Image: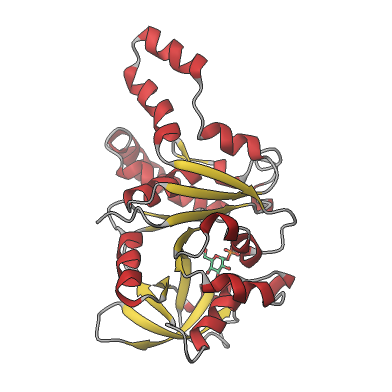
Amino acid sequence: MSHKSFKAVIPAAGLGTRFLPATKAMPKEMLPVVDKPAIQYVVEEATDAGIDDILIIIGRNKNNLSNHFDSVPELEDKLRAKGDIDKLNKVQRSSELADIHFVRQGEPKGLGHAVSRARAHVGDHPFAVLLGDDLIDERDPLLTTMLAQHERTGATIIALMEVDPEQIHMYGAAAIEATDTDDFVKVTGLVEKPSKEDAPSNLAIIGRYVLTPAVFDVLDHTEPGKGGEIQLTDALQELATQEDGPGVYGVVFRGRRYDTGDRVDYIKAIVQLASDREDLGPELRPWLKDFAATL
Ligand code: G1P
């Protein structure tokens, strides 16, 4: 199904401090995951769901990001002259993927604030938000399911995933009620990064959202929350508990997700993705086994 009427917003304005010094002069969304920057996977996920208008919310180091999605005529000419069509296609792909726009966040005041910066571009329409720290395997089309659920219900849709209760403090956590549809739940409450004791469940928000434009008015009056930042989770909590709105629903995801948010998870994501690839896996997998045996 095509979802051309939706725009996607990708916040990429974080400071990336967990990856210093690699992120000193480069946004963390440009870190390579095997041989593509993390953000290209996310853009491809949006285009695979039929979205071709993408707004990236940037912080410092804008040039790295915009150059990646631009053409590089001198490199392309060289590859064409050498007849290296495979590499030429790789270089051209990122500039032909989608219609990509950029807006600056200004001060880094949190995810909710970053999303509110999309208002002028998005206008009065529902839109998708994709966070670059979570990569969703292309074989498990989560966003397409979420867009279809939004079209059916008119509601805000978030992606939820069961995590180990010990990990819930790293995520937004949802209180839910079942619906008639498997893995589609009504969200009755949300808490950003609760302690294990305070978490309403072990269902964590993973970084995919289909939002309605009503979120912008809510974000306008959302006070700084966890960590002193304006939290998207807090705005969604208000939408979930409004009596007259369409509410918030969750798609429970049971597919393959790769976390690139911290260093160990980032290394795991690279190993998992590379060992699954046809071009790299056959060489990598036996080595991995031998290496694991030495540990
Ligand atoms: C953000 C959200 C959080 C969500 C997480 C998913 O947190 O605030 O609710 O669970 O993304 O990756 P961050 O990881 O940016 O601190």
Residue 147 point in image, percent of width and height = 34, 64
Q: Which of 250 and 20 is in front in this view?
A: 250
Residue at (45, 11) in percent of width and height: 78
Residue 97 point in image, percent of width and height = 40, 38
Residue at (58, 38) in percent of width and height: 65
Residue 194 point in image, percent of width and height = 59, 80
Q: Nearer the viewer, residue 144 or 198?
A: 144
Q: Number of labelled discs?
A: 0
- Say left or right for 71 vs 22: left
In the picture as drawn, the residue positioned furthest to the front comes out as 124
Q: How was this image coloured?
A: secondary structure
Residue 295 in view (yes/no): no
Residue 81 in view (yes/no): yes
Q: Nearer the viewer, residue 109 or 127?
A: 127
Q: Which of 222 and 68 is in front in this view?
A: 222
Q: In this view, does 6 lie above or below 211?
A: above
Displayed-image quarter of ligand 1: bottom right
Residue at (52, 88) in percent of width and height: 242
Q: In this view, does 164 lie above or below 83?
A: below
Quarter of the image with the N terminus in it: bottom left
In the picture as drawn, the residue positioned furthest to the bottom comes out as 243
Residue 240 point in image, percent of width and height = 49, 84
In the picture as drawn, the residue positioned furthest to the top comes out as 81
Residue at (44, 38) in percent of width and height: 34
